[in-house]
Image (cartoon, rainbow, N blue to C red):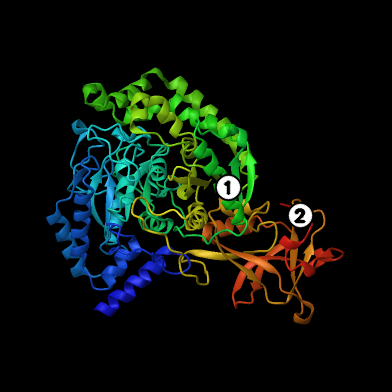
Amino acid sequence: MHDALVAYVLRAATGAGQRNGAFMHATDIDGDHGSIGAIGSVLAAHAGGRGIAETIERTYAAIAAHDDPALFIALRSREEALKRAAELAAEGPIDKPLYGVPFAVKDNIDVAGLPTTAACPAFAYRPERSAFVVERLERAGAIAIGKTNLDQFATGLVGVRSPYGVPRNALRADLIPGGSSSGSAVAVAAGLVPFSLGTDTAGSGRVPAALNGIVGLKPSLGALSASGVVPACRTLDTISIFAGDVADAFLAFRIAAGYDPADPFSRSFAPPALSAPPVRPRLGAPRADQRKFFGDRFAEAAFETDLARLADLGADIVEFDIEPFYAVARLLYEGPWVAERYAATKALIESNPEAFFPVTRQIVEGARKHDAVAAFEASYKLAELRRETARAWRQFEAMVVPTLPRPYTVAEVLADPIALNSNLGTYTNFVNLLDLAAIAVPSGWRADDLPSSVTLIGPAGSDGYLAGLAQQVQLRSGVRIGATGAAVAAPRQSARRAPPGRIEIAVVGAHLSGLPLNRELIELGAIFLREAETVPAYRLFALPAANPPKPGLLRVAPREGRAVAAEIWALDAAAFGQFVAKTPPPLTIGTIEFSDGASVKGFLVEAEAVKGAQDISVFGGWRAYPGASR
């Protein structure tokens, strides 16, 4: 049984990461940092013979040692958690890629047997079943050990708006923990659990991650079901995931994601898969004169360094006008969307307004000034801004912004709770209103020894592409995981093939990463797999009058051909069909043979179309050809 368990856990870890083999980490559960460890180390410990019960005992010991009564609103009893550990041990690890891994849940997400309070005692209820996402994680073998504190009704980015107290920032006690998912972020950053669930409407899954030095994954809207979640703004809410590194966050996301017919806002996306790092991505950064740091010179300098590091990774940094995005962000709090918060709490705010935390009540009651006319006017304005912001995306595949302009102390926020909360949402508030995916990731160090953080943002469905890039950012940042002192180890390297449910597509021209048409792949949810080289049986031609410039790849007799550089991407079946259907003549889709033995569908050209065209095969690929535009 022991050998089977070892083999299964290694298979689970490899499949979970969906990139370059198993995501095993440098720090294990027995490290010197008092940390429960990362997902991979917990799985490895169980595969090595340690019982799940011991992992649970260590988890509760770590929570006790951390000694922060404001962190959890409710803890599952140790006895109940140990009972579940015994049940899992009896069931065995098969089909349980999170076998025995403890996790925490924000207390606006239902966990059967534990009260849901949304940080409002008068609102509390005890659900009979767990939220859809929690159930999926538990079926995968994870054990929910408690409900974490939050800004009441998920209203705030600060983490200080709770009658249950202020969770202690894991990095520096005088700083706010960030919100609204304060406890969930701190629980991971303090090493108490490998991952946790939060929610994100305006940045609640990203801001606390940055303030505690960890990863915050905000999925595409609808990728994670909201069934069993107390809504804040129902049309904009999503569950988010906190973890020490990108691999763990994406593993939890991959397991939790799935279409839920009971949630009217659930959407059917391709099964999540982690992209390899893009080769030469174009990343949009706000113009230097439009960046906001509210007087924090350390934050400003750190972001400049972050951009330079991204350029060193091969990214082409494109500065763009971010003002239309700021305008969208202002709509969220200045416009009628606050009325959704009123709708979510209507029964309580109208019957017992004193039950609300003072600042929360002030914000929610502010919705009364908005009427149906204002709601329609704001929706028209948002439609205009969506059209305007769409133009920016023609310049780049993903956006990179500071996760937050600057950190604040608890004292500063208590002295100015509304304005400073608004400042924290500068780079986060627009994301869900524009139906974008995002991931916040540690990116380096500030001069005051706090970690810096950037957020990568892309179209809905680009979660895997963003995470692949974020993983490289984190690996090169030198930042340890939260307060644990644990390093992020590079994943093992292996050949990249399309994950189940996706089809490989080869591109040789304007769809290459960083080139003008690459965004068409990103918008369809494509993940980058690998660079490749064809067998020496092709010629490459510059097609005349093509806009944007593009080449044609022609199969020829082996003695007449050369090897040509290409990239291999992967799309789900529906997106593959959409992509192929847009292929313009004289290009066609055929099978291309590669030097690694792979045969992949990709762009070829009709022989008649290259008569008189310039043969550019000598350059070895389109990217090296001087006439290829960026």
User: Is residue 329 placed above or below 625 in the rendered structure?
Assistant: above
As measured in the structure, the alpha-carbon distance from the residue carrying label 1 to the one carrying label 2 is 28 Å
Q: Secondary structure at mark 1?
A: helix
Q: In the image, which is nearer the foreground, mark 1 or mark 2?
A: 1
Which quadrant holds residue 165?
top left
Residue designated by label 1: 307
Residue lying furthest right: 612
Q: Where is the N terminus found, in terms of image quarters?
A: bottom left
Which quadrant holds residue 509?
bottom right
Instruction: Please tell me which residue lies in front, 76 or 510.
Output: 76
Observer able to see residue 337: no
x, y percent for residue 570: 55, 62
Observer able to see residue 518: yes
**Mark 2 is on which residue type?**
Pro
Mark 1 / mark 2, whichever is N-terminal: 1
**Mark 1 is on which residue type?**
Leu
Q: Secondary structure at mark 2?
A: loop
x, y percent for residue 365: 33, 21
Residue lying furthest left: 79
Residue designated by label 2: 549
